[in-house]
Amino acid sequence: MLPGVETESRSSRPRVRSGASRRSVSTGRIVRISIAVSIMLIASLYLFHRLEQLLIRDPRFTLSGVDGDTAAIEIAGATHASRAQIERVFAIDLGRSVYLLPMSERRETLRSVDWVKDAAIARLWPNRVVVSVEERKPVAFVTLAPSRFGLIDEDGVILPPAPDRFALPVLSGVRASDSVADRRDRVHRMLRLTRDLGDEARNISEIDVSDRDNLKVTAPRDGHIVTLLLGDRDFALRYQNFLNHYAEIKRRLPNAATLDLRLADRITVVE
């Protein structure tokens, strides 16, 4: 045999056997890894199931405790919101595992409780629930009926009375029958006005937003009640113009009760 032929045939045979061996080894290793992963996954699912059943069935995780502890629900931040109403939100959960508590659903229900703007719920293992309440902040009084007032917040939500003494203006032009979106829009117009007036807003007793393009404010001045028509912009400039000329207005027109400040170069008395 020629030297070249013998060398070529010898070198070609080992390469065929080596490739087949590597393919066999790789396939076997993949199978073993797949089986090991499957076993681990099944074991993990089984352990999770056992743990879940423990959390659901073990009386140590029952809301209200094994002995029916009434302090199972801890409430923080509720100054005006009724604690009884907040606890009633979780009435259906008493006697059940805290693991089964539907957090999002209960949080949404809490938002419908008077004075509650938002709330956070946390499980305090093994058998407690902590509720942290963010209360609404009133920005004005609103007339609900003759001689009956309520409170309203920046979102246009009407709040029930509270024992606190709030130093807030009366907001006219808002009714309980209005939609929340409409009330919110009118409240935001009022807030834009009070922000523009700054410290002078403390001297305003009533703000009328019946006409959204012409806000009216009522303020006591030197023993008289004066109503000012401020339009829908430049509130601070127009109010300052009134203050600068009030002494002269009072001297010349002592009985003037309603003043139109919407024109830049004059103040008009409204009969």
Image (spheres, grey):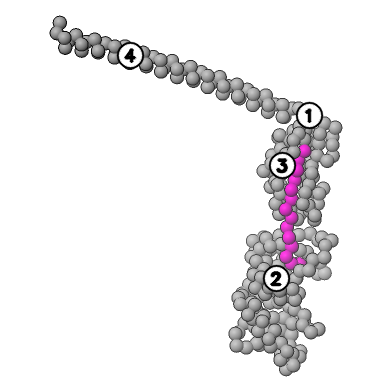
- Residue drawn where x is 60% and y is 85% of the image: 264
Percent position (x, y) of residue 124? 74, 38
Instruction: Give the residue type that dot 4 points to.
Output: Ser
* Mark before the other along the chain sequence, 1 or 3: 1
In the displayed structure, would residue 213 be above or below residue 49? below
Q: Which residue is farthest front?
A: 3
Question: Which labelled disc corresponds to residue 59?
Answer: 1
Q: Residue at x 52, y 19 (%)?
A: 36
Disc 1 and disc 3 in contact, CB within 8 angstroms:
no
Q: Tell me if residue 126 can be seen.
A: yes
The answer for how far apart the CA atoms under marks 1 and 3 are is: 19 Å
Three-letter code, disc 3: Ala
**Of callouts 4 and 2, the N-terminal one:** 4
What range is drawn magenta here?
Answer: 128-141
Label 3 residue SS = strand
Using the image, tell me which numbered label, if any, was put on residue 122.
3
